[in-house]
Amino acid sequence: MSTIEPIHVIGGGLAGSEAAWQIAQAGVPVVLHEMRPVRGTDAHKTEGLAELVCSNSFRSDDAETNAVGLLHQEMRRLGSLIMAKGDAHQVPAGGALAVDRDGFSAAVTAALEAHPLVTIERGEIAGLPPEEWSSVIIATGPLTSPALAQAILDLTGETSLAFFDAIAPIVYRESINMDIAWFQSRYDKVGPGGTGKDYINCPMTKEQYEAFVDALISGDKTEFKEWEANTPYFDGCLPIEVMAERGRETLRHGPMKPVGLTDPRNPDKKPYAIVQLRQDNALGTLFNMVGFQTKLKYGAQAEIFRMIPGLENAEFARLGGIHRNTYLNSPKLLDPTLRLKAMPRLRFAGQITGCEGYVESAAVGLMTGRFAAAERLGRPIQPLPHTTALGALINHITGGHIETIDEGPRSFQPMNVNFGLFPPLNSAPKAEEGKRLRGSAKAIAKKKMLTDRARTDLEAWLAGSALPAAAE
């Protein structure tokens, strides 16, 4: 019998299952608590661990030019159970990794049940975990039970954990046409942390504005799910298309008002309307479209928002949406190892931390498990390089986000892993003969430089890590 006190993991989804595996592989006993089948959810159909409730895709497996593919590779390198069983139960999906959901869940469940250091307990943890549990990982995702959610709120002093999350599209800074757009704050106001040139402004003529409003009103839209119906809007944010439907001038007197802004290239002509984008991360690589939360379908969003002058070639790190969500204001509440500042015996993993996607949830679970195991064993916790996919994702959750520079709604938003979260390269990619690359060749070369740097830095980090890469 192990004399090491166990770590408790609450939630048997992808994040909790991965965290439990990493802890056990480090030689630390772990108790994995899953409330199903004692208490069911609106989304789950089985009692299996790591059940995939939506898509069966882990998205692109391209580790050379895709950030999620790189994340796959890094997780495999660190002995991820989720990736091992995903690979073992792969189904044809072109360049993506898709899995047989039943076989995958059964394999994850079997591996954890067979591990000598894993104990699986079925039943709900209502409220905060018992005080005698000195190390706990909460990985309960968007379907966190009401009692536990309320306990977390009471502990953190936050006002809401489940709400309609109004998400505006986020654009890669380098894809914005600055020959048309310009930097300026309204009335050149210098807010907290601002300079007076904190927004990117995209001007519209009357004709462009009218065509844009028409496109918003006629664009394909998604509907709320049944179980979202009774959740209130968060911060009273209305979809941009709903505002447009309330009157053709509504947007010009709302998020697209042109007052207090002057186009430096044409100072004598006032734009009819202006779309503003605000810096979204500390690196300055991502900008969000202010006030553009939307229920438009993704294809319609990309087409309509590229009608905006300056965004004609926009590339989106994420598109907008409004849906029920459950996540922490992690940059404020969590430390760099995902411990709750108000109660450090608690760590968080998965979607509740503010990541999106199966793979991202499992990745955060992987690192949370490693952090907790190292702490339990009294070994130093080495921070991940932000140049890796794992490090970039953790950094966004715990500290890479930039607060709004003015009074506005909660601005930390869940995000999939993407290259906009990575620190910029020190040099631009060039062709073998030293010539400057352009267009798609430049984009591909840049991504390859980012992934090459990530692999090198992950190996260096792993060589100095207190925990080896777990092996299945």
Image (cartoon, helix red, strand yellow):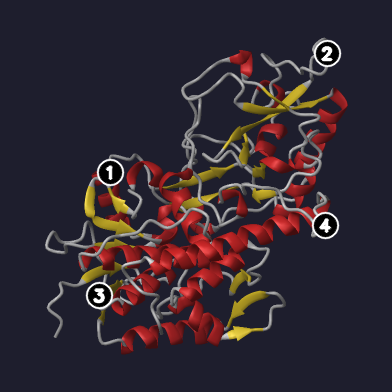
Distance, label 2 to label 4, CA atoms, is: 46 Å
Are the residues tagged 4 and 3 within 8 Å (C-beta)? no
- Could you tell me which secondary element the residue under label 4 belongs to? loop
Q: Nearer the viewer, mark 3 or mark 1?
A: 3
In the rendered image, which quarter is residue 245 located in?
Answer: top right
- Could you tell me which secondary element the residue under label 1 belongs to? helix
Give the x, y percent position of residue 85. 49, 83
Disc 2 marks a residue whose amino acid type is Lys
N-terminal of the pair, mark 3 or mark 1, is 3
Q: Residues within 10 Å of mark 2 (few under 14, many from 20)?
A: few
Q: Report the disc number at residue 156.
A: 1
Disc 1 marks a residue whose amino acid type is Thr
Distance, label 4 to label 1, CA atoms, is: 56 Å
Q: Is residue 247 above or below residue 114?
A: above
Residue 230 visible: no
Are the residues tagged 2 and 3 within 8 Å (C-beta)? no
Residue 243 visible: yes
Give the x, y percent position of residue 137. 29, 63
Q: Report the disc number at residue 52.
A: none
Q: Is residue 233 above or below residue 117?
A: above
Judged left or right of residue 427, residue 357 is: left
N-terminal of the pair, mark 2 or mark 4, is 2
Residue marked by disc 2: 269
N-terminal of the pair, mark 2 or mark 3, is 3
Give the x, y percent position of residue 84. 49, 82
N-terminal of the pair, mark 2 or mark 1, is 1
Residue marked by disc 4: 433
- Which residue corresponds to the image point at 83% horizontal and 16% vertical from the top-left? 266
In the rendered image, which quarter is residue 447 located in?
Answer: bottom right
Residue marked by disc 3: 30
Disc 4 marks a residue whose amino acid type is Glu
